[in-house]
Amino acid sequence: MRKYYWGFIFLLLSLTPEGIGQGLFEQAQQTDTNIESNGYNLNGFVRSAMYAGADDDVEEKIYLQSLYSQFGLSAGVKAGTYGAAYAEFRTRTGFEFDQRFSSFELREGYADLYTGPFDIRAGKQVLSWGKSSFINPSDQFSPQDLTFRSPDMDDLRMGTWALRTNLLINSSSTLQAIWIPVYQPSVLMIEPFSFPEYIDINAYEDRSAYLSESSFGFRYDLRSSLLDVQFSYFNGYRNTPAIAIDSLHFNFSTFEPEKLFLDQVPYRIHSAGLNITVPVGSYLFRTETAWMKAFSNENVAFTPFPELSYTFEIEQSGSNVTVIAGYYGKYIIDFEKSEGNVSLITNDFTGIADKVPPGAVPEPDVIEDILSGQINSFNRLYTYQEEEFYHAVYASASVSMFHDLVDLEIPGMYNFTSEEFSFMPSLKFNITDGLALRTGAYFLSGKNSSLFDMIGPALNAGYVLLDIKF
């Protein structure tokens, strides 16, 4: 019966092509209008950036976190009135997190088919759900690389292979469906974090591409002059994988790990979201609520509790200034207080010997339970499930000055529960239409043993970026 179920899903997605979507799809549609029938366009950029931060180990020493050059090229092709295609290639080389690197990727590459009220998009694409400015609770599947050094938040989004379809029901409503056959995890923010020498995190290895392990979702959009409403449902693997023990080499003389290998393990979830946007004059009032629950048959220690997340924000736009202010909250359903801590991760681990009676030799199962408790505590720290309720506020101001020659952005967020603060101001000088110089700072701070406390020293920096677009 299971194989017929997935066959039905696949057939439904195949017969329900893509139409007028949101976000990047709308941008692609706008790009298509600039392409004549059977024509194409070509765009690109060249970017050079330098990020410099303070070295906590050496007082008053500044070091280069990142120094890179990047080249991007995108092409859009239109084949009459029924089809189009888009591809974006990016190559990047330089020095980052004490290592030289060079990368080349197809960030997006997809084809569109237009058939009246039905459209379909197939290929590698950047997906995004949700309306909120800072945090999108309903966007549980879009992978991101939060360690990527760029002031443009869109650069942090990663492409994933998908079949995305839209049915234009009428002029004001659209039904979208997505199918993601292969899981693409986010890059964990702990990538640049300095773990104890005995800990290694294995690179993510692709799982099998069985249809039963693919992900799917549906979204309904209703737009009117009074309000916009968006309902969504997702059934699949969460974009952020959990950390679990792969293998352990333990020294019974010192009662400490010699080598601990950790795996990135995906887990399947249900997620449902509701987004409402109400325009009132020059103001926009937005709220977004999402429920998430891991599948019950994945009853493992690292599976998160069910949770309910919500945002409320207001945006006011003027001729030169846009201000956004909002609240983000989260309620952990079926919450239970964790008994462990994250000392294993933070180099403060006191050892197994302190956790067993003097002279006793702990059994391997006991050792593994103790270490697993530490790792699972870190998973709860990373997914913000250490407390039953979380409360945060955020704000952003964007100011255009001197006839759009200078742009100032000042975004910030404070989490009252985790006591974490983020601040990322930037100043952009638009020298010519295609040439811009941008400078700013990236700052994360948190209480002792919080996530921002761990990753802040590796990511906090000031930067200068020169960008040429053509």
Image: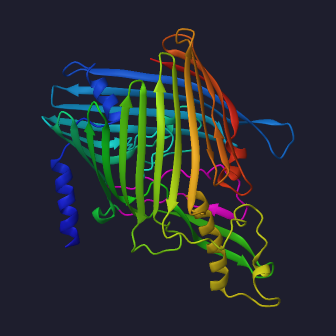
In front of the other: 345 or 334: 334
In front of the other: 44 or 351: 351
**Occupied quadrant, residue 282:** top left
Q: Residue at x 66, y 84 (%)?
A: 366
Residue 392 position within the rendered picture, expressed as x and y whole percent measured from the top left: 58, 47
Magenta part of the chain: 181-208
**Occupied quadrant, residue 381:** bottom right
* Quadrant into which the N terminus falls: bottom left
| 222 horizontally vs 299: left or right | left
| 219 horizontally vs 185: left or right | left
Of all residues, the one furthest to the bottom in this rendering is 360
The answer to whether residue 41 is above or below residue 193 is above
Residue 148 position within the rendered picture, expressed as x and y whole percent measured from the top left: 57, 40
Of all residues, the one furthest to the right in this rendering is 59
| Main secondary structure along the magenta-highlighted residues | loop
Q: Residue at x 73, y 71 (%)?
A: 258
The answer to whether residue 337 is above or below residue 392 is below
Q: Which residue is drawn at 53% across and 44% down?
A: 327
Of all residues, the one furthest to the left in this rendering is 116
* Magenta-span inclusion, residue 401: no
